[in-house]
Image (tube, rainbow, N blue to C red):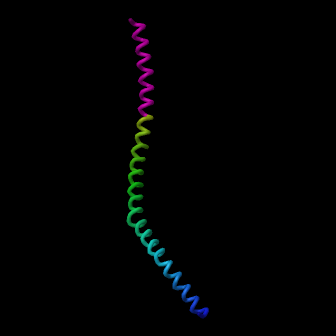
Amino acid sequence: MSDNELLLAISNTIKTQIEPIREDIKRTKLLLENDILSRLQNIEACYTSTYRRYESGADQIETMRIDIDVLQKVVTEHSEKLQKIS
């Protein structure tokens, strides 16, 4: 067997072994593009909308906390005044 024939045989063997790997890579790319990417986009959209709701809710909770503090002070003052009157 000549060097050229040996190189050709090695080349054919490598091509035969690489082809299944190429097919696997192609299937993986298609899976990523068609399935995984769309799912990730859906997860991102859900996460983003939930984050926005929680962010505005956190602001509302802080406002309510301040209002409750004020109410507690006023009720305490009024209770003290009512006890003095009675």
The residue located at (45%, 26%) in the rendering is 69
Q: Is residue 50 magenta?
A: no
- 5 and 54: which one is in front? 5
Q: In the picture provided, is 12 more to the left or to the right than 49?
A: right
50 versus 20 height, above or below: above
User: Residue at 44% across / 68% down in the picture?
Assistant: 28
In the rendered view of the protein, which quadrant contains the N terminus?
bottom right
Q: Is residue 60 above or below residue 7?
A: above
Q: Nearer the viewer, residue 65 or 5?
A: 5
76 in magenta: yes
Q: Please, which residue is most extreme toward the front here?
A: 1
Q: Quadrant of residue 32?
A: bottom left
Task: Please name the predominant secondary structure of the magenta segment in the image.
Answer: helix
Please provide the residue range marked out in magenta: 63-86
Q: Residue at x 60, y 94 (%)?
A: 2
x, y percent for residue 85: 40, 7
Foreground pick, 65 / 13? 13
Name which quarter of the figure residue 54 lies in: top left
Residue at image point 39% right, 59% down? 39
User: Which is more toward the observer, 55 or 43?
Assistant: 43
